[in-house]
Amino acid sequence: MPNGSLDGHIYGPESIVLPWPVRYEVVLGVGAALLYLHEETTEQCVLHRDIKPGNVMLDASFDAKLGDFGLAKLVGDGRRSRTTGAAGTLGYMDPACLSAFTASVESDVYSFGVLLLEVACGRRPGVPNGDGGAVHLAQWVWEWHGGGAILDAADARLGGEFDGQEMERVLAVGLWCAHPDRALRPSVRQAVGVLRFEAPLPALPARMPVATYMSPSAVADSSSDGGGG
């Protein structure tokens, strides 16, 4: 692609900053591509399983093309959660995939959420916390959200030159998609609807929820028990 990857533009030279209008169109383009994979390709759903800026290519007009389908999988009806072997890149992988070794439409949504936050914040998934460690970007943005100052999470290199409503939607949808509880994440269609101002902002708690994940054996045991008393 003439303009290379999105990663190269978000984390390129300090003297070259990707303007907000371009970033906003890029996230809409990635959302449209993911919606096509999940709901509009065939009767089956395509899981990409490795959504990240390095796999988003930009053409001569900076239109986004979602690439690298080396880990993609066909699963059942895209409107229902189906699972397959987990794969992807750390930082973008749904934490549930790491514990249950599965992937689903919800895990693609999680990766999309991390990408949204990266585009808005200009930061990698691991944000240094000042103690020699790092916190996940979603947690970092959620802290700004909880303090009522989510726009302060915006990429400082933009110098405040962005549409505040668009930025708020990208950040809020990013958190919604990266929600620790996959059952509370939106579908790609719902996420894109908010990004396009076709639906209201999601209601997010002030503090990032903590999710617990069951191992595959625990899931199997609970299923075999049948939930009976």
Image: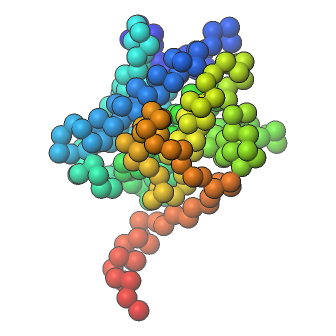
**Residue shown at 30%/56% (left/top)?**
80
Which percent across, then down, holds residue 31? 40, 33
Instruction: Tell which of 104 and 98 is nearer to you.
Output: 104
Which percent across, then down, holds residue 39? 27, 42
**Residue shown at 53%/41% (left/top)?**
173
Examine the image and state in which quarter residue 141 appears: top right
**Quadrant of the drawing holding the N terminus:** top left
| Residue 58 appears left or right of 22 | left
Q: Is residue 207 above or below residue 66?
A: below
| Residue 67 appears left or right of 25 | left
**Outermost residue to the right:** 131
Q: Is residue 68 above or below residue 82?
A: above
Residue 205 visible = yes
**Residue shown at 68%/8% (left/top)?**
15
**Residue shown at 63%/9% (left/top)?**
16
Q: Is residue 6 above or below residue 185?
A: above
Q: Is residue 102 above or below residue 118?
A: below
**Outermost residue to the left:** 43
**Quadrant of the drawing holding the C terminus:** bottom left
| Residue 95 appears left or right of 105 | right
Residue 92 visible = no
Which percent across, then down, holds residue 58? 42, 15
Which percent across, then down, holds residue 4? 45, 13
Q: How many marks?
A: 0
Tell me how the rendering is colored: rainbow
